[in-house]
Image (tube, grey):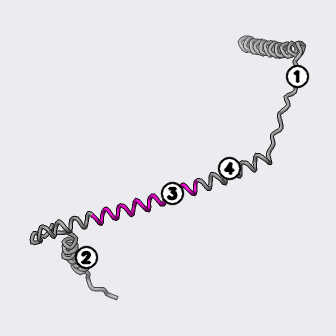
């Protein structure tokens, strides 16, 4: 099947049409959101009344928000009080069920002989370790002397 040669204009024609439509439509949407400022033909008294009405509505909305916030704060306080009461009751129940026994520490007096025995044993172990190390060094020295004579 042989396909006709596609030209670059034909390939990009839909993209160009979309771009032109966007260029024409975008300013229209942008202009719809822009106000041209206050109407200068209005009576100043009517403009003042409108400003006062807007201020009154804003104050009313702010008061409603404050009232809702205060109600939420009061509800949180009530919930905290309920939680605290429940935790206090649970603590009281646990304190009744759990009784701690006083730990009895056995009175073990170490005698002088057990202190001396430990010290003598530790000294003996250190001394044997020292003697073993000296023996090891002596053997190494003999190997080095034999190695030099060969």
Q: Which residue is mark 1?
A: 108
Asked which secondary structure carries label 3, the reply is: helix
Structural distance between the alpha carbons of marks 3 and 2: 60 Å
Give the mark nearer the N terminus: 1 vs 3: 3
Q: Which residue is mark 4?
A: 88
Give the mark nearer the N terminus: 2 vs 1: 2
Q: Which residue is mark 3?
A: 74
Q: Is residue 123 shown left or right of residue 149?
A: right
Image coordinates of residue 118 in percent, x first then y, are 85, 16
Asked which secondary structure carries label 1, the reply is: loop
Give the mark nearer the N terminus: 4 vs 3: 3
Asked which secondary structure carries label 4, the reply is: helix
| Residue 107 or residue 11, whichever sits in front | 107
Residue most extreme to the bottom:
1
Q: Residue at 89% across / 15% down in the picture?
A: 111
Q: Which residue is mark 2?
A: 15
Q: Can you tell which of label 4 and label 1 is closer to the viewer?
A: 4
The 10 Å Cα crowd at callout 1, few under 14, some 14 to 19, many 20 or more, is: few
Query: Residue 109 appears in which quarter of the rendering?
Result: top right
| Residue 21 or residue 139, whichever sits in front | 21
- From the viewer's perspective, is residue 110 above or below residue 28? above
Whether residue 72 is in magenta: the answer is: yes
Give the mark nearer the N terminus: 4 vs 2: 2
Give the mark nearer the N terminus: 4 vs 1: 4
Q: Residue at 21% across / 65% down in the picture?
A: 51
Q: Is residue 15 shown left or right of residue 94?
A: left
Q: Can you tell which of label 4 and label 2 is closer to the viewer?
A: 4
Structural distance between the alpha carbons of marks 4 and 1: 42 Å
Q: Is residue 104 shown left or right of residue 142?
A: right
Structural distance between the alpha carbons of marks 1 and 3: 61 Å
The 10 Å Cα crowd at callout 4, few under 14, some 14 to 19, many 20 or more, is: few
Instruction: Look at the image and tell me in which quarter the C terminus lies.
Output: top right
């Amino acid at each position: 099947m042989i396909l006709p040669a596609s030209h670059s204009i034909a390939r990009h024609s839909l993209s160009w049409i979309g771009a032109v439509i966007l260029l024409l439509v975008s300013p229209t949407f942008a202009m719809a959101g822009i106000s041209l400022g206050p109407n200068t033909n209005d009576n100043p008294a009517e403009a003042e009344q409108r400003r006062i009405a807007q201020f009154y509505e804003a104050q009313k909305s702010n008061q409603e928000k404050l009232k809702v916030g205060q109600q939420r704060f009061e509800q949180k306080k009530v919930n905290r009080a309920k939680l605290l009461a429940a935790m206090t009751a649970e603590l009281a129940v646990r304190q009744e069920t759990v009784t701690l026994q006083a730990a009895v520490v056995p009175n073990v007096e170490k005698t002088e002989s057990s202190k001396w025995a430990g010290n003598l044993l530790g000294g003996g172990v250190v001394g044997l370790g020292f003697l073993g190390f000296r023996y090891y060094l002596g053997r190494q020295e003999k190997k080095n002397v034999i190695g030099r004579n060969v």
